Image (cartoon, coloured by chain):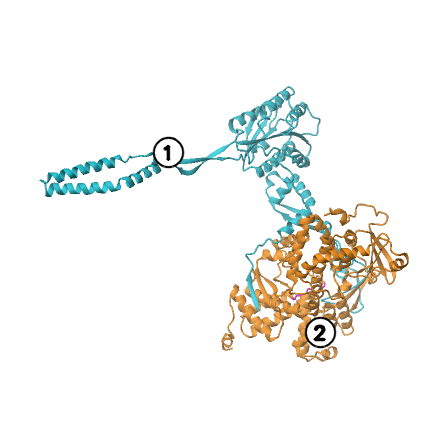
Chain colours: A cyan, B orange
Amino acid sequence: MSYVIDRRLNGKNKSTVNRQRFLRRYRDHIKKAVEEAVSRRSITDMEHGEQISIPGRDIDEPLLHHGRGGKQTQVHPGNKEFTTGERIPRPQGGGGGKGAGKASNSGEGMDEFSFQITQEEFLDFMFEDLELPNLVKRQLTGTDTFKTVRAGVSNDGNPSRINIVRTLRASHARRIALSGSSRSKLHLAIAELDRLKVEEPDNFADIQAVEAEIVLLRARIKRVPFLDTFDLKYNLLVKQPNPSSKAVMFCLMDVSGSMTQATKDIAKRFFILLYLFLKRNYEKIDVVFIRHHTSAREVDEEEFFYSRETGGTIVSSALKLMQEVMEARYPTSEWNIYAAQASDGDNWNDDSPICRDILMKQIMPLVQYFTYVEITPREHQALWFEYEQVGEAFADTFAQQQLVSAGDIYPVFRELFQRRLVS
Amino acid sequence: MSAREKKRGQPISTGSEWTFELIRAYDKEIARIAEGYALDTYPNQIEVITAEQMMDAYASVGMPLGYHHWSYGKHFLSTEKSYSRGQMGLAYEIVINSDPCIAYLMEENTICMQALVVAHACYGHNSFFKGNYLFRTWTDASSIIDYLVFAKQYIMQCEERYGIDAVEDLLDSCHALMNYGVDRYKRPYPISAEEERQRQKEREEHLQRQINDLWRTIPKGADKGNEKDAGRFPAEPQENILYFLEKHAPLLEPWQREVVRIVRKIAQYFYPQRQTQVMNEGWATFWHYTLMNDLYDEGLVTDGFIMEFLQSHTSVIYQPPFDSPYYSGINPYTLGFAMYSDIRRMCENPTEEDKRWFPEIAGSDWLSAVKFAMKSFKDESFILQYLSPKVIRDLKLFSVMDDDQKDELVVPAIHDEPGYQTIRETLAAQYNLGNREPNIQIFSINRRGDRSLTLRHQQHDRKPLGDSTEEVLKHLHRLWGFDIHLETVRGDQVIQTQHVPPRGESDSNEYPRLDLAIPPI
């Protein structure tokens, strides 16, 4: 007796839990692989998964079994030339699988166990434990902006929102309903009057009576108003709290002569990481690229990273421009503002205090977070120390770190955005 | 009867697409023919699944439902990877020893393959599960599904109560010893999920009491106690390490003992399968070959169908020679199929040689001969009993002796008259689980001293232990909670010892104990 059952529609991901368990167990390995990938990959390359390899010996499940050695006798098929008692030189290095080949199939696991993780898992591992500071502020609970949306028609409202079509339709319907019987009587009366005038032109009494009735009916119809307050229909608009899910990211970079392409590459990776991170937290992200030497300019991404400039350095020019752009295009009621500044630390000495002032007075109060990375192996200069003062004043929203090589980016990034307790 | 008469000669189907009606039609015909051979089977539950689901089934080693563990995830990832890269095809079927017998068909297959799988799994494997003495005595097909459900739920509850990590560590340790969690000689008590559930509570208390008795430190009367204590415990060496741990490990919590028991029961369930690979696959292959050919003889399948069938049949039973790059040991399908077919040949067309070697079956009724061969043996004894000179010659079997104390390998026997007996014995020994796995038993525990546990490895042919032994001992240490010693014995002489933790480092924290890792309830 047999039953045939179609199970194809049953869930197919029965192993998901076990897969998760596996990832969980080897999360250290995977994290390491992810970190390596982050520092190795090119920037446009963050949007796919990663091949993870784990050394076979770390992953083997130990079992009690025989090792190589001792006296082992095995039967094999396909004899061609051997005769009883023949001696064969021992094959070297397990090549043919003769002799002790089978006994130690799980002994040495030098092979790597490799598998694929998805892009989502890749980013999850990359951003694990990270959380943008003060993200709470205007995120989902941010009810300081609203948008009005249509929500049908209502009976009361502001005269400017009157819905003419619906109002007239209501009025028409009401008029038909209230004057219908009078109108049909009026039609009958007019027909009677016409008939009387033709057939009995002498019957004045009846004609007068009918005429009086017609006047009465007309007056009655006229008493039904064309438009009653009852008819008025208004477009209903309701306010919906608009969670501010938009963020703008300002990338500020020094492109003066002292910045080499290598330095810029490091900066670029930092920006990309920040961008990817914001992308996971906000629906819409604008990126503003501002580069500066002695003067600042807003540019597109290509130019920002790849065109060369020379000259001195005045950092405050970029900060001023940023502040102007913020004011003109990104009101804080709608936008979460993040800024990342990269520089090699050089600045015209007299300019550093000005930078501090602009930051403290005009920028810091408006931004969610400002990060400054200094990409240099050298000693800090004036700018760093001025920024330290900013950091003291805005401990929650300002961070600065030093980078030396591309490998430093990820740890520094993590440190900058370390999960902080929401106080 | 007249309806069947009419149908004779009409192929059931001509295309290669399958439908549920067609599968049912083929199953009906195959069942009819199988009945003619009096194959005794459990009812069949044929489930059509997708390739992804087949990978899931793979990952859980064929169990229709298993508890969660990372090792299944690992299995799944590697299957998924090699499948998606086209490095391997999936097996056409998986069949589960349960009542009703569950067989999975993959939707990608053609109707010919589906019919082949039905014949192979639903009538071949199924009748083997029902007939073979190992399966009859050691597994209980009617309760396994219930038991797996119970095990899964129990382990899930444990995870909720004690945390995933604690349960995972415990399972890791149990899995390392899984092959040593079976009774090899004693018939196990049949499992029943309902009883397990009912008795569980009772057993927890009872067990804990027994353990407390064993480890009682209150001094007894001086005269009696000492005498009794002098005896070794356990009195006889114990082969079932997990059972011993479940009953006697001093520090395990009741729930941990229950988990040990679950792993042990599942190991026991798979034990017959590990011992009857050649017989089981050979039997199923023999029957799909016989049944499909009968279908063809009755004209129920087309020439194209039978060609497709033969093509996959021959690739299933292909045995690469020892020097082929694809060689990875003897193909159990080939060996098993060759042996059953040869039994049939010996019954139907015995030669002089057969009469000399197999006087009792040469010329007898083939059906009862193969059925007897299926029912009463396991791989080792089956080969010892039935490996005929003709099969040895056909497969060109030869043996190679590798002695690490000599420079050259020796060929002790080949497929010729003086060699048959040797080949047969060597090959049988090769399938003896007792030889394949190191013989390690629990020798004694130190009840009044440091509570250490001593294992004895009886060495055979100087074969050393593999290099993950120390890891396994660490796992054992985690379960036992006190020092573990492993003595390797040749004859009566202890030639090597291994200790966890290594001697002199007993205080090291490197070897965590379970009781320390788990917060009190």
Give the residue displayed 90% in from the left and 58% down from the top: B223
Magenta span: chief secondary structure: loop
Instruction: Identify the element where label 1 is drawn.
Output: loop
Q: Chain of mark 1?
A: A
Write down the residue under mark 2: B390
Give the residue displayed 67% in from the left and 67% down from the top: B280
Q: Are marks 2 and 1 on the same chain?
A: no
Q: Chain of mark 2?
A: B
In three-dimensional space, the C-alpha distance between marks 2 and 1, rounded to whole angstroms, equals 101 Å
Amino acid at circle 1: Ile
Q: Looking at the picture, how far across and down is residue A269, in whole percent?
A: 63, 35
Which segment did they paint magenta?
A: B317-322
Report the disc number at residue A162.
1
Amino acid at circle 2: Lys
Q: Is residue A229 left or right of residue B57?
A: left
Q: Looking at the picture, how far across and down is residue A186, in whole percent?
A: 21, 40
Verify whether residue A98 appears in magenta.
no
